[in-house]
Amino acid sequence: MIKRSFFALSKPKLTYDLLGSDQKAPEAIPVPGSLTLLLPETIDSTKQALITQGDAVKKGEKLKLYEDGTDYVLSPVAGTIRGFDSYSDDFGNTATYILIKPDPSKTGEEDTVGLEPEEDLDFANANLRHLPGALPFATLADENTSINTVIIAGADTDVLSDTCQFVCTAYADEMVEGTRILKRMTQVSRIFLTLPEKLQTQANFGSVQILKTDETYPSTLPAMIMKDHLGTELPAGKTPEDMGVCFIRAEALVSLARVFKTKAPVFEKVVTLIDKGGNKQRLTATLGTPLSKIFARFNVHINDSDRIIIGGPMRGFATYTPHHPVVPDMDMIIVQDRDTVTELSNTPCVNCGECIRICPANIPVNLLVRFLEADEYEEAADKYDLQSCIECGLCAFVCKARIPLYQYIRLGKHELLALRADA
Ligand code: SF4
Ligand code: SF4
């Protein structure tokens, strides 16, 4: 059980963006002259690599670094491997960029890997993990995880974003077809679709059961959906999957339907860009497209100290390079001008209590952060409910001292898991 019960949100009331009725089709970004695929595996010079610089690749070819590797990416184009680079995220997790030079002349059948999709989880896990929307086939195919409920995210989980609403209404027929395929694959019969209660749409979602979500942030986060709609509180330290609930982007099901229809992998990802002026652009880009190509198309100039945020303003993360690529779970990119970036500070807590009042999990955040600042992760978990945090970011949003509370909490959770794994 969550040790502390949820309570109603107080000020400030943040609301989700609602999809307007006059949605135009996304603008398609052309395939650039170089793609960057992010493979969550590290280069190990002691191992014999399966792929090397200069190798020709086919469209749809599965790329792995090593024979015993568990992760792979699919090449969205036929072309040549230009090289490799290393990547490290906020927590020091490392991965590899595979750089591909597309060859536009290679469009024949012999340049594409054919696919005979099977309604089988092991097949899907081995071949379809890297589709736009990032269907969690690794979880669904895991025999140690028993999923009995699927929740399709049609309601976006961060403020300013309406990508999920757009995808599930613009491509409703394909999403419903993808849901049917997933149902046959998983045998899960409890499937729901979250949608904002105020969303006006003529889209037909067939027999998929709708969960109408409140406009107030963070009502669409998984822990809140489970509590408000399934009547289940997420226990501290557990994931929805631990409780048999799997959350899936609507776009992942659209991708699944398209793969079965075309008998080929698909690579076009829907993304919403918010520029420095707050203008919203909807686009599709091939997986692996560097963000710099998107910025160039929409005349967004990146200066030193501007901030590029992947995801939403509450839960997203900043990337240091405009060369970071479009990846399957990237719904939104925000560019903030350096003059409008709110600087975080090392100022001590002023005990205003705002973080405690706003926290939907009722965590004493001001006390928790003292332990996190001192790297005392076990104490933070045992005494101050680190693992009850649902990662909404509201505490950091209201903090008068501008302490990076959310970053401390995410890092603290990461370090706690690492500590316990080592133990
Ligand atoms: S991010 Fe902050 S406000 Fe949100 S649940 Fe965690 S501690 Fe509470
Ligand atoms: S909001 Fe910030 S300054 Fe206020 S009590 Fe919480 S940590 Fe301290």
Image (tube, rainbow, N blue to C red):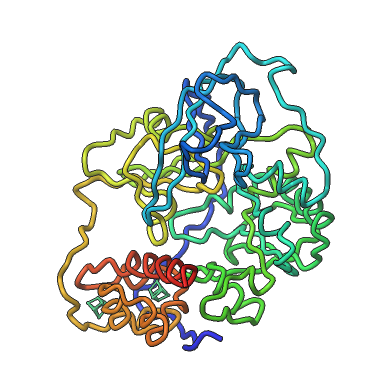
- Residue 19 is left or right of residue 70, and the answer is left
Taking 110 as reference, is 189 above or below it?
below
In the foreground, 382 or 264: 382
Examine the image and state in which quarter residue 371 appears.
Answer: bottom left
Residue pushed farthest left?
Answer: 347
Q: Measured from the top left, where is residue 327 in percent x and y?
A: 52, 42
Residue at 66% from the left image edge and 77% from the top image edge: 230
Q: Measured from the top left, where is residue 296 in percent x and y?
A: 37, 28
The answer to whether residue 159 of the structure is visible from this angle is yes
Quadrant including the N terminus: bottom right
- Residue 169 is left or right of residue 27, and the answer is right
Residue at 54% from the left image edge and 71% from the top image edge: 214
In the foreground, 279 or 108: 108
In the foreground, 406 or 417: 417
Write down which quadrant ligand 1 falls in.
bottom left
The answer to whether residue 168 of the structure is visible from this angle is no
Residue at 16% from the left image edge and 75% from the top image edge: 348
Q: Measured from the top left, where is residue 257 in percent x and y?
A: 75, 43
Residue at 65% from the left image edge and 51% from the top image edge: 135
- Residue 123 is left or right of residue 356, and the answer is right
The tally of labels here is: 0
Q: Measured from the top left, where is residue 235 in percent x and y?
A: 56, 81
Taking 99 as reference, is 216 above or below it?
below
